[in-house]
């Protein structure tokens, strides 16, 4: 859900022009055949112009049997050229933070103006379904930091204080880096305490630890526990805030805790024992504490107090804070695929779904579809998917990265996004990736937590003559 559509500023034009002037060029016509590299066994389709500056190209596997597969896979690239038109690059969360929806549904909510519908989009970062506990419906929780238009929707992974990998999307360009959120709650007395997260069940960090106190309790799906937390809920949450006993498998969620309701002016309107079932007021916050977090709230906040929520987004790589203004979006995941055109040594060769190969059953193939966001040598954003033609298929993580190193693609930096059945690519109103989830005997596209898209808006970044 994007709100307060942001204007692009003049620096965007300068940035685009600079990138266009200083980036390496692709091989000139007549300079010989392009270097296909790892795509030597793939055939390039005719590029399709979706809109001025938005081009969709499909590569189809020419010899699937050589890859131990019965069916050819499809690699799809959407290149976004801000020198050819006024284009945005942004993220969106659809209806709310708690609601997972198909990519089509999310993109349809970006704008009600048909002529400004996004030109192209892919699914975004990792997420996890929280259990339906205490009579509540299942809700969605983001993995690591997510931001739309400067609004935080979740905290970063901890990773020993090093933060998690993410793409900062600002002025139409994605910048892949390590990010850490630093958040604190400040009482009227000036005393402060760390905020553990935003918009998820207290006591149950999903997918990755949020601080050094979080302990792993499950690996499938990855779930952590922390008996002493403060979690803030924004009006993007979109559902009544969690009650105790959300997850019977995580005892920390049973803590009745303490709850504080804050209006849009930062004034406490309720401070009470117990928690859950409250709807976040428009522009306001609901703060839930368990364990020592509940005790801190109980001792320091009463009705009519004023509280401050301090939020910082820290770029660990550059050791700088990124101001959370309306120009900033963030989509995150665990793994950069390419860094300066090189596969990072720390990238694991992981895969969640394997099956026996069609040509050599003694060797397993990876059927994880893949999604990526990156930039190429021309300074242009790219959206990437790898799937089967009519089924979920893909590759091991490092093998996918190897495909992206193909010189003909010219991709410099790339971040792995949510994959598997979540992988979806859409241009206009057409979805180009196959449905993978079987519901009531019918294959459907999976609901996802957020999206990355390009559409109409902003300023064109024109190349100087």
Image: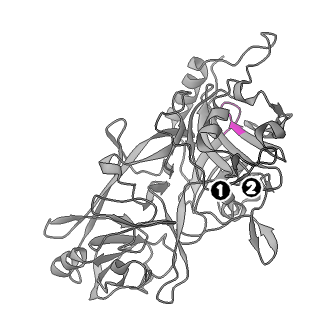
Horizontal and vertical percent for residue 264? Answer: 37, 72
Q: Which residue is mark 2?
A: 392
- Can residue 458 be seen from the camera position used here? no
Instruction: State the image quarter where residue 289 is shown.
Output: bottom left
> Is residue 303 or residue 31 the one in the foreground?
31
Horizontal and vertical percent for residue 242? Answer: 43, 81
Number of residues whose C-alpha sits closer than 10 Å to that of mark 1, classed few (under 14), some (14–19) or many (20 or more): some
Disc 1 element:
loop
Q: Is residue 294 left or right of residue 283?
A: left
Q: Residue at x 70, y 62 (%)?
A: 108
> Is residue 444 or residue 116 the one in the foreground?
444
Badge number at residue 259: none
Vertical placement of residue 26 versus 183, above or below: above
Q: Nearer the viewer, mark 1 or mark 2?
A: 1
Q: Residue at x 65, y 56 (%)?
A: 353
In the image, which residues are magenta? Answer: 78-86
Label 1 with label 2: CB-CB less than 8 Å: yes
Q: Which residue is mark 1?
A: 353
> Is residue 208 or residue 383 the one in the foreground?
208
């Amino acid at each position: 859900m994007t709100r307060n559509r942001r204007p692009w500023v003049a620096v965007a034009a300068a940035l685009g022009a600079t990138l266009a002037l200083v980036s390496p060029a692709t091989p000139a016509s007549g300079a010989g055949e392009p270097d296909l590299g790892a795509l030597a066994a793939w055939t390039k389709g005719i590029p399709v112009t979706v809109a001025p500056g938005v081009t969709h190209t499909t590569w189809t596997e020419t010899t699937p049997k050589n890859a131990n597969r019965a069916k050819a896979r499809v690699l799809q690239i959407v290149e976004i050229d801000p020198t050819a038109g006024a284009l945005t690059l942004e993220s969106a969360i659809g209806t709310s933070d708690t609601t997972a929806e198909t990519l089509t549904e999310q993109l349809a909510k970006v704008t009600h103006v048909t002529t400004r519908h996004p030109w192209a989009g892919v699914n975004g970062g990792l997420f996890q379904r929280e259990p339906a506990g205490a009579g509540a419906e299942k809700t969605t929780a983001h993995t690591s930091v997510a931001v739309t238009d400067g609004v935080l929707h979740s905290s970063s992974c901890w990773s020993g204080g090093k933060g998690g990998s993410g793409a900062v999307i600002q002025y139409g360009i994605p910048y892949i880096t390590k990010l850490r959120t630093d958040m604190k709650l400040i009482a009227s007395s000036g005393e402060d305490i760390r905020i553990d997260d935003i918009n998820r069940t207290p006591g149950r960090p999903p997918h990755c630890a949020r601080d050094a106190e979080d302990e792993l309790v499950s690996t499938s799906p990855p779930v952590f526990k922390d008996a002493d937390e403060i979690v803030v809920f924004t009006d993007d949450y979109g559902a009544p805030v969690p009650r105790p006993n959300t997850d019977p498998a995580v005892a920390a969620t049973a803590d009745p805790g303490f709850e504080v309701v804050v209006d849009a002016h930062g004034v406490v309107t309720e401070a009470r024992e117990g928690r859950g079932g409250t709807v976040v007021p428009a522009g306001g916050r609901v703060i839930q504490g368990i364990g020592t977090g509940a005790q801190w709230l109980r001792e320091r906040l009463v009705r009519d107090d004023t509280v401050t929520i301090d939020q910082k987004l820290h770029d660990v790589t550059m050791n700088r804070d990124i101001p959370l203004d309306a120009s900033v979006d963030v989509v995150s995941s665990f793994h950069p695929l390419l860094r300066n055109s090189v596969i990072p040594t720390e990238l694991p060769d992981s895969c969640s779904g394997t099956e026996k190969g069609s040509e050599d059953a003694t060797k397993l193939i990876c059927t994880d579809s893949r999604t990526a966001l990156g930039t190429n040598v021309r300074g242009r954003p790219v959206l990437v998917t790898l799937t089967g033609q009519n089924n979920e298929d893909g590759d091991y993580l490092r093998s996918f990265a190897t495909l992206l190193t193909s010189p003909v693609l010219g991709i410099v930096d790339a971040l792995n996004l949510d994959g598997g059945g979540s992988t979806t690519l859409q241009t206009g109103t057409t979805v180009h990736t196959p449905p993978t989830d079987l519901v009531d005997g019918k294959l459907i596209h999976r609901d996802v937590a957020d999206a990355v898209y390009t559409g109409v808006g902003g300023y064109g970044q024109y190349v100087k003559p």
